Image: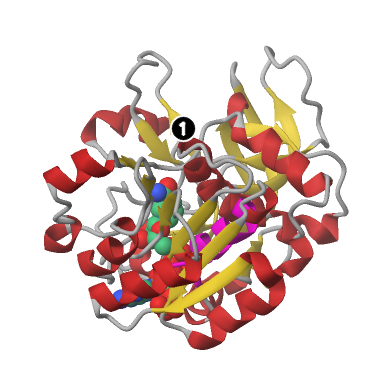
């Protein structure tokens, strides 16, 4: 099979012929039809994100494809079935406290290395080997729509946070960093779950206006000024009532003050879900013990989503609660993978999807 290989951090991806993967018990092979490319993929590949990742590797955290072959223990999946490949792989022997990796993306902790070495290569290839439980059927789709269905990978991440935060119909949510890829998806998912009001923060006025125009009166927007107290007042004013929950997707370039601007606006008993990228000094949020206690605030970090979220998200799309038509797709063949990675960084946004189509060539 043909695959895009990262041989060294900072080197361009190289198109190579690799042996076809072979499925054992508990595994399936997927013909990759489409793989989404994250806006920050270039920073993973040039090493600046310092993701633990053994090289060489075929990168690509999941995507959409058709089952090619299954292991002998499979019960329902059949060759040709369309599936969403979830990149989150958890160790099977310690379910109370499993190691977690993202296939073709990162192994996170040294203890997860055995998993990373077996489930190593990702979706920037014509075929991929995945644990059977990581291939979820999505029903029949047109092959031409496979790129659009990669939006599942975008939508599922905030869905994981909203489920963990127990968002209820009618509640008011703040999506901090809502003009970005995952934050923007969070707005769409929260509305589909019945949020009464969604306050979206960001710096990009055009992206904020686009979100407000598209989603109508349940969405209010706040442009960050960088003044924490001022931004918090603007968020509270836009909510026009108690804020039940904050979903934070600010990236590593943002500041703790930007997180606090939203987090400290939650009502008594409110929930703050942290899914973004802050780290180092900015990762120390400086949330006050006494405020947390008296305000009865729940602060929870969330990484990815549970497996049960996947069929539910497929149903939300099938039911018309989430419109995949909202996405502006740019698709690239496998030979154009380096252009695709550059494009994903330049064209980041809530509606933008950069997609690799490994089955196609230039
Ligand atoms: N927890 C998880 O499971 C999980 C999964 C995937 C990704 N993530 C993390 O989620 C974060 C967001 O990813 P993404 O792909 O959505 O990123 P993105 O598209 O670049 O979006 C970043 C958002 O933050 C806003 N922002 C505010 N202050 C900023 C600043 N100082 N610098 C840059 N942007 C700023 C951006 O919009 P404006 O330009 O309008 O301000 C935008 O709304 C990343 O850190 C990523 O690692 C977490």
Image location of residue 107, percent across then percent down: 33, 40
Image location of residue 348, percent across then percent down: 51, 75
Magenta stretch contains residue 188? yes
Image location of residue 72, percent across then percent down: 69, 14
Does 3 sit above or below residue 337? above
Looking at this view, is 272 or 137 the one in front? 272
Image location of residue 114, percent across then percent down: 33, 28
Does 208 sit above or below residue 84? below
Q: Residue at point 34% right, 59% down?
A: 265
Is any part of residue 13 visible from this angle?
A: no
Is any part of residue 320 visible from this angle?
A: yes
Q: Residue at point 58% right, 35% down?
A: 129
Q: Residue at point 81% right, 27% down?
A: 78
Looking at this view, is 70 or 266 the one in front? 266
Give the total of numbered labels: 1
Question: Which region is colored magenta?
Answer: 177-190
> Which quadrant of the structure image shows residue 138?
top right
- Disc 1 crowd, CA 10 A, few/some/many (<14, 14-19, 20+): many
Magenta stretch contains residue 140? no
Q: Residue at point 44% right, 54% down?
A: 243
Q: How is the image coloured?
A: secondary structure
Q: Is residue 325 left or right of residue 43?
A: right
Q: Which residue is mark 1?
A: 89
- Residue extending furthest toward the bottom: 206
């Amino acid at each position: 099979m043909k695959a895009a290989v990262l041989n060294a951090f900072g080197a361009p991806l190289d198109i190579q012929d690799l042996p076809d993967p072979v499925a054992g018990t508990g595994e399936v092979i997927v013909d990759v039809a489409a793989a989404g490319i994250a806006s920050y993929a270039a920073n993973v590949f040039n090493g600046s994100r310092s993701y633990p990742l053994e090289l060489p590797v075929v990168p690509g955290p999941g995507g959409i494809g058709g089952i090619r072959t299954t292991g002998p223990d499979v019960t329902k999946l059949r060759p040709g079935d369309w599936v969403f490949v979830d990149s989150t792989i958890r160790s099977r022997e310690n379910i109370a406290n499993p190691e977690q990796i993202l296939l073709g993306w990162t192994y996170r902790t040294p203890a997860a290395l055995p998993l990373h070495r077996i489930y190593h290569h990702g979706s920037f290839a014509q075929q991929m080997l995945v644990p059977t439980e990581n291939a979820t059927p999505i029903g029949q789709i047109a092959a031409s729509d496979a790129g659009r269905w990669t939006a599942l990978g975008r939508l599922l991440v905030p869905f994981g946070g909203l489920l963990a935060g127990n968002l209820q119909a009618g509640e008011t949510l703040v999506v901090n960093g809502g003009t970005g890829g995952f934050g923007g998806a969070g707005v769409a998912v929260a509305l589909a779950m019945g949020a009464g009001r969604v306050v979206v923060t960001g710096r990009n006025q055009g992206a904020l206006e686009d979100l407000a125009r598209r989603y109508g009166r349940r969405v209010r927007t706040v442009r960050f000024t960088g003044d924490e107290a001022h931004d918090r007042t603007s968020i509270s004013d836009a909510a026009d009532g108690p804020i039940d929950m904050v979903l934070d997707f600010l990236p590593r370039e943002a500041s703790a003050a930007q997180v606090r601007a939203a987090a400290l606006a939650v009502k008594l008993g409110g929930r703050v879900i942290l899914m973004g990228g802050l780290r180092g000094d900015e990762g120390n949020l400086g949330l006050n013990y006494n405020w947390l206690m008296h305000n009865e605030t729940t602060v929870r970090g969330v990484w990815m989503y549970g497996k049960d979220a996947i069929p539910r998200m497929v149903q939300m799309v099938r039911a018309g609660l989430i419109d995949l038509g909202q996405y502006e797709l740019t698709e690239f063949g496998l030979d154009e993978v380096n252009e695709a990675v550059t494009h994903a960084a330049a064209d980041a946004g809530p509606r933008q999807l950069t997609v690799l189509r490994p089955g196609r060539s230039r």
